[in-house]
Amino acid sequence: MILTGAGISAESGLKTFRDSDGLWEGYDVYDVATPEAWERNPALVQDFYNMRRKSVLEAKPNAAHYALTQLEDKYDVVIITQNVDDLHERAGSKNVIHLHGVITKSQSSINADLVYDIEGWELKMGETCELGSQLRPHVVWFGEAVPMIENAIQIASQADIFVIIGTSLAVYPAASLIDYVPYSSPKIIIDPNTAPVGGIHDLKIIRETAGTGVPKLVEELLI
């Protein structure tokens, strides 16, 4: 099982609010990434995610994304990502679970089970689902439930090897997944800024960027 966060996409040019003191591309996250923000000013939220979607579509997978696809030659790989981009899929990974949604999709604003692909980068106000409600980004906002977390916990509990890439383990509930990994399973963190982690058996920390550390680890695992 591989858990990825913003660090793996940073080298593709994509940033998150954590890069700049709670601001995301100049916006306070609570003005653009909460249900309350959507209720207050849906046009602002829609425009914000249109710009993020445009950036995602212009970005390209990097060496870390591509290296992970090579693991599928030898291992049964499941990638659990906190990222809303689709760079894992575009690199060729076949089994990707998005904890926080996918920005290239939309969903009904009254029924989150109604999800649609977006053509291009722009989702417009006035575009509606089959129930007639405005379409919103298919992204889990602050204060919303994380629907795929139970599935991720189940996968973590069966992991023979658990790799964490580009995340500080500060965003819950994703950060708690390491607690469900079997005691004897190797656990590997690749992140240049990871703080000391205590109380976890068989833990290895690689303080490198994803683009450098992931290809090295993949090479080791494929020997």
Image (cartoon, helix red, strand yellow):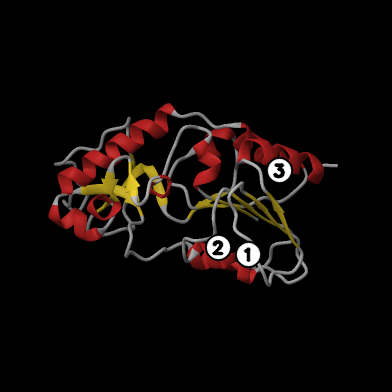
The amino acid at mark 2 is Ala
Camera-nearest label, 3 or 1:
1
Question: Is residue 164 rendered to the left or right of residue 183?
Answer: left
- From the viewer's perspective, tell me whether residue 71 is left or right of residue 170: right
User: In this figure, which residue is indicated by the disc labeled 3?
Assistant: 72
Mark 1 and mark 2: span between their CA atoms? 6 Å
Write down the quadrant of residue 53 in the picture.
top left
Q: Which residue is mark 1?
A: 156
The crowd level at tag 2 (other Cα within 10 Å; few <14, some 14-19, many 20+) is: many
Image: 155 above or below 11: below
Residue shown at the point (28%, 37%) measured from the top left: 50
Q: CA distance from mark 3 to mark 1?
A: 18 Å
- Residue 152's tag is 2
Q: Reading the chain from its start, which is encountered first: label 2 or label 3? A: 3
- Circles 1 and 2: CB distance less than 8 Å? yes
Of the 4 image quadrants, the one containing the N terminus is bottom right
Q: Quadrant of residue 181?
A: bottom right
Question: In the rendered structure, are the residues bearing label 2 and label 3 in contact, judged by CB atoms less than 8 Å apart?
Answer: no
Q: Amino acid at mark 3?
A: Glu
Sequence-first tag of 3 and 1 = 3
With respect to residue 223, does 169 lie above or below? Answer: below
Residue at the (22%, 43%) spot, across then down: 46
Report helix, strand or loop for mark 1. Answer: helix
Q: Check the image and report above or below for 27 versus 143.
A: above
Q: Identify the element where label 3 is drawn.
A: helix
Q: For label 3, count other residues whose C-alpha is less than 10 Å away and answer few (under 14), some (14-19) or many (20+).
A: some
Q: Nearer the viewer, residue 176 or 112?
A: 176
Q: How many marks?
A: 3
Front-most of 122 and 164? 164
The answer to which of 50 and 25 lies nearer the viewer is 25
